[in-house]
């Protein structure tokens, strides 16, 4: 679409001076960045600043906080909850909620344990059936939502109770089933770490892929007559990412290395980010979250979007439950209970996903769960009790929602101006 066509069609409401043109360079990118900040589009900036503050404070109070051993433990702790949080991010992007992710994760763990110990299933079969159960739950939620218009809050609240009861029934009277100690899922969640050379090579490949995708996107924007990042800016971003990844890998390799379960979590975040930002389905998710009526008038199959998102949310919850069970080597009544669903929702919101729908990122799950686990790890090192952790987590969540509300108000006022 040419500049004239865009202007005539009204598809770009407020054209900025650098909305079209050649590569803008590093200076232009900085001006665009500060312009977005002034307009209230803060993105992940608040959570990144908050994470730096949290790490600095805990490192001052406990010199072991940023030790290699504690960072590896932190990565291991992030995997299961972070994967559940990815699904929560998806439903929040639609302006919906899923309160039952904890119960679904607990049910999948119970199915896995019973299948391995009492039904004689192989591990792949047990995993597939547990994940299939999660997908069926998501389909059930989507059916109730699109067919009867029941609010997702009510549907998933009922699911929280109902599937918790089903989890207890599957576990039986003992309420706890141990996973065989030689099961590969225990090794995957506790003992599998990348070799140092492999982790560095993987970091380099990730940066190369990032640079390729970024350059291709810039080229497409340039061909369309839109402003795009210059070659220097793209290389600078890739170099910054390389430094960050090498630093993280170096720190983890000073102890046991990069955990396989954490690598799976990161891979899922990257895949879902690509799906949300580079596919028609992802654009449809943001459109429905922004305005259901406008999305429907534009030809988007809203029902299909709701179905896929609810199914994916339940699938991620089931997968997170499997990893959690493998990490503690058992499935019990406490699996998926307690603060698991609340932490998943809090991680998504703290990471930058809006409760009001239409704004967020798959990386919100990563940033949010790292913040929460950092708080938990730091307080544990300081020998502080759970009440303090809950209060601090609640305060951080409230602050994240306040920032989101203020940024929405700022964007609205900026748009009217």
Image (tube, rainbow, N blue to C red):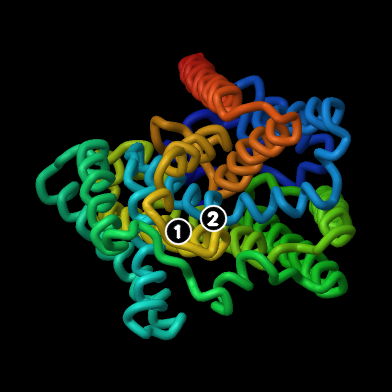
Q: Is residue 73 above or below residue 61?
A: below
Q: Crowdedness of circle 2 by 10 Å Cα count: few (<14), some, many (20+)?
A: many
Q: Which image quadrant is residue 149 in?
A: top left
Instruction: State the image coordinates of residue 150 (x, y, percent, origin top left).
Output: 15, 40
Residue 413 visible to the viewer: yes
Label 2–label 1 contact, CB within 8 A: yes
Q: Nearer the viewer, residue 219 or 373?
A: 373
Residue shown at 67% from the left, 27% from the top = 384
Extreme residue in the left direction? 148
Q: Nearer the viewer, residue 281 or 402?
A: 402
- 78 sits left or right of 239 in the view: left
Q: Nearer the viewer, residue 305 or 27?
A: 305
- 337 sits left or right of 248 in the view: left
Q: Crowdedness of circle 1 by 10 Å Cα count: few (<14), some, many (20+)?
A: many
Instruction: State the image coordinates of residue 96 (x, y, percent, origin top left).
Output: 32, 39
Q: Is residue 237 above or below residue 356?
A: below
Which residue carries the number 1 mark? Answer: 321
Q: Which image quadrant is residue 195 in?
A: bottom right
- 350 sits left or right of 205 in the view: left
Residue shown at 27% from the left, 59% from the top = 173
Which residue carries the number 2 mark? Answer: 80
């Amino acid at each position: 679409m040419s500049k004239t066509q865009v202007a005539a069609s009204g598809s770009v409401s407020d054209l900025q001076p650098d909305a079209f043109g050649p590569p803008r360079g590093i200076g232009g990118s900085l001006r665009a960045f500060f312009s977005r900040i002034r307009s209230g589009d803060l993105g992940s900036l608040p959570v990144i600043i908050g994470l730096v503050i949290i790490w600095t404070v805990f490192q001052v109070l406990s010199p072991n906080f940023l030790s290699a051993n504690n960072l590896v433990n932190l990565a291991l702790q992030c995997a299961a909850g972070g994967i559940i949080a990815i699904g929560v991010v998806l439903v929040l992007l639609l302006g919906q909620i899923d309160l039952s992710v904890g119960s679904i994760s607990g049910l999948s763990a119970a199915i896995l344990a019973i299948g391995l110990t009492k039904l004689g299933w192989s591990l792949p079969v047990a995993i597939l059936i547990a994940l299939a159960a999660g997908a069926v739950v998501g389909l059930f939620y989507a059916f109730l939502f699109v067919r009867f218009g029941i609010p997702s809050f009510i549907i998933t609240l009922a699911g929280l109770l109902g599937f918790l009861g089903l989890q207890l029934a599957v576990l039986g009277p003992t309420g706890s089933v141990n996973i065989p100690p030689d099961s590969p899922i225990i090794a995957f969640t506790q003992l599998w770490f990348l070799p140092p050379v492999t982790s560095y090579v993987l970091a380099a490949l990730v940066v190369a892929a990032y640079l390729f995708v970024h350059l291709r996107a810039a080229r497409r924007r340039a061909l369309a007559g839109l402003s795009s990042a210059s070659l220097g800016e793209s290389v600078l971003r890739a170099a910054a990412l390389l430094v960050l990844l090498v630093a993280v890998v170096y720190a983890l390799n000073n102890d046991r290395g990069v955990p396989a379960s954490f690598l799976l979590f990161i891979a899922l975040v990257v895949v879902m980010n690509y799906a949300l930002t580079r596919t028609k389905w992802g654009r449809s998710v943001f459109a429905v979250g922004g305005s259901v009526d406008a999305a429907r008038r534009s030809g988007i199959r809203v029902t299909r979007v709701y179905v896929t998102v609810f199914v994916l949310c339940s699938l991620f919850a089931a997968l997170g439950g499997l990893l959690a069970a493998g990490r503690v080597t058992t499935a019990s009544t406490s699996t998926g209970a307690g603060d698991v669903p609340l932490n998943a929702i809090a991680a998504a919101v703290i990471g930058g996903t809006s409760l009001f729908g239409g704004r967020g990122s798959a990386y919100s799950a990563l940033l949010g769960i790292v913040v929460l686990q950092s708080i938990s790890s730091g307080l544990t090192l300081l020998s502080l009790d759970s009440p303090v952790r809950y209060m601090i987590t609640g305060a951080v969540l409230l602050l994240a929602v306040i920032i989101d509300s203020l940024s929405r108000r700022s964007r609205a006022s900026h748009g009217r101006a």
